Every structure is written in C-alpha cells, then in structure tokens.
Image (tube, rainbow, N blue to C red):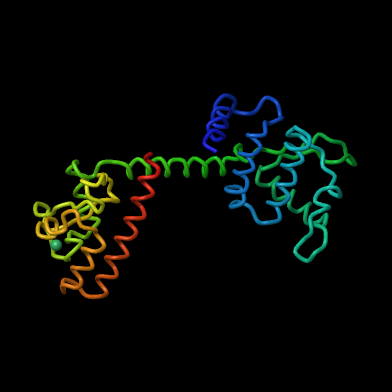
C-alpha cells in the first residue's frame, strides 16, 4: 500500500492534471480508495453511488475522463433499497448534485437532443478530498514522530509526562513538585524498554526505587492492596496503564 501511495504522490507531483485520461491499475486502486474513504464523507449516499458508477465507466471501462452518459444505461443493475433498479430520476438528481459541487463537469457545447457528455474528476483532484488526504497525512506524521521521541533525557519533554500524569506519583498518588518527580519506565530499561512517552510514568522517589524492574501492573496492584488508593482510583490508574501499554506496543511495532 505504501508503494501505491508513493507512486501516486509522485504522479500527482509530476502533473497537476493528467495529460491523458487513462490511469494505471495502481492509480485506479488508490483513487477508488480515496473515493470510499474521503469522497463518501462529502456526499449523500445516492450522489456518491452515481459518482462511483461514473468513475468506473470513465476510468475502468473507457479510459477517458470525458464520457457520454445515457441515464437509462447507468445503474440499471443496481437495486435500490426497496429492491427496484435505481430510477432515472435518482440518477439524474445525483448527477445534478455532482455538477453543482464541481465533482463532475457538464460539457455544455452539445446540441439539444444529444446525450450529455461529462468530465469526471478523479477523487484526488477534488479540493475538499485533497484537504482530507493532506490532513490525515500530517496527523499521522506528527503523531508518529512524537510517539517515537526520547521523553526521558529531554528536560522539556520530561515535564510533559509530569503534567500528563497530573503532577502526582502514578503508583501512590502523592503530589509532586517539578524538582521532586522521577520518571519510571513501565517496561524497564534493563529489559529493553524505550524512552517513549508511552513507556514513561511519573513516580515519587520511594515508588520509583521500590518498583525497580517489577511489572508495573503488579506494582500498582500492590500499592492498592497496601491501602495507598481507593478502589475507584485504582481502576482509573489501571485503565490508564493498560492504554499506555497498548500504545507502547503499537509504537514498538512501527519503529522496527
Ligand atoms: Zn509514589
């Protein structure tokens, strides 16, 4: 999939608008993916289905972005939700919606009586879809970068963990100050635990040294049994810990 995205990106950079209308199988797959992921969020069900029919006809069957459309032939094999073939009316309204939104262009130079000709834009050429693609790309890059950063040795990042944990020891809930907190590795350094923020937790000096290389979940349970927190507090800490562990495992798998 990564390869497909890369090749399409390159193709998009090389040409703003494709010079010829035929697209490769990989591009077709990528564009189809854009349609189902992003364009479907912009459109109501019926115009979306009509778009898919036009997209398939243009790029899969005819290999050109300008196609003539006979409404009676479009969608004749698709049944509506009441079990009847999609009506011309539905298709016509769908087409009108798509024209209004500039997702397809109507070729106006035809004489009356001729079948209509439409230019079908690729999903990646539609500005709203482009924005969604870019937003997703930026989020995943930012998140991924921060997730894999060293939060242990960088003082500014250490403070972020401290603030995330509400300036309390995670294991006994005692209040801590900027200069009295420690960071504990959920998966110990000695066992290959990383300095990712998902593997770090705020601890007081006592808990940090008592916990040492012990399993974090067991250590938290011991604190609860030792009367350091209420059941409600314990369940909350336990859920937070489980989320961090899950996140950490995800990070570990992407960093390989
Ligand atoms: Zn503590």
Q: Position of residue 228 (x, y in %)?
A: 16, 71
| Left or right side of 33 for 243 | left
| Left or right side of 219 for 31 | right
Above/below status of 221 relative to 249? below
Dividing the image into four equal quarters, which quarter contains ligand 1? bottom left
Q: How many marks?
A: 0
| Left or right side of 160 for 11 | right
Q: Position of residue 158 (x, y in %)?
A: 19, 47
Which quarter of the rendering shows the N terminus?
top right
Frontmost residue, 34 versus 3: 3
Frontmost residue, 189 versus 41: 189
Q: Position of residue 174 (x, y in %)?
A: 13, 65
Q: Residue at x 24, y 71 (%)?
A: 233
Frontmost residue, 125 versus 172: 172
Q: Position of residue 100 (x, y in %)?
A: 68, 47
- Of all residues, the one furthest to the right in this rendering is 113
Which quarter of the rendering shows the C terminus?
top left
Frontmost residue, 174 versus 12: 174
Q: Residue at x 67, y 34 (%)?
A: 25
Q: Residue at x 25, y 41 (%)?
A: 150
């Amino acid at each position: 999939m990564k390869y497909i995205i890369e090749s399409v990106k390159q193709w998009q950079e090389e040409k703003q608008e494709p010079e010829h209308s035929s697209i490769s199988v990989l591009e077709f797959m990528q564009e189809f993916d854009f349609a189902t992921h992003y364009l479907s969020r912009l459109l109501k069900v019926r115009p979306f289905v009509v778009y898919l029919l036009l997209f398939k006809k243009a790029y899969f069957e005819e290999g050109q972005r300008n196609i003539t459309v006979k409404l009676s032939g479009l969608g004749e094999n698709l049944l509506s939700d009441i079990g009847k073939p999609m009506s011309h009316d539905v298709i016509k309204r769908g087409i009108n919606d798509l024209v209004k939104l500039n997702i397809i262009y109507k070729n106006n130079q035809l004489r009356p009586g001729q079948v209509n000709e439409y230019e079908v834009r690729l999903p990646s050429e539609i500005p709203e879809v482009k924005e969604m693609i870019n937003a997703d790309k930026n989020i995943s890059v930012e998140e991924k970068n921060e997730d894999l950063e060293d939060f242990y040795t960088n003082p500014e990042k250490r403070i972020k963990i401290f603030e995330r944990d509400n300036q309390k020891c995670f294991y006994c809930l005692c209040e801590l100050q900027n200069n009295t907190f420690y960071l504990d590795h959920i998966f110990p350094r000695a066992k290959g635990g990383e300095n990712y923020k998902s593997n770090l937790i705020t601890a007081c000096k006592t808990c940090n040294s008592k916990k040492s290389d012990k399993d974090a979940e067991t250590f938290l349970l011991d604190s609860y049994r030792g009367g350091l927190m209420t059941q409600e507090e314990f369940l909350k800490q336990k859920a937070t810990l489980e989320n961090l562990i899950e996140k950490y495992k995800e990070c570990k798998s992407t960093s390989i």
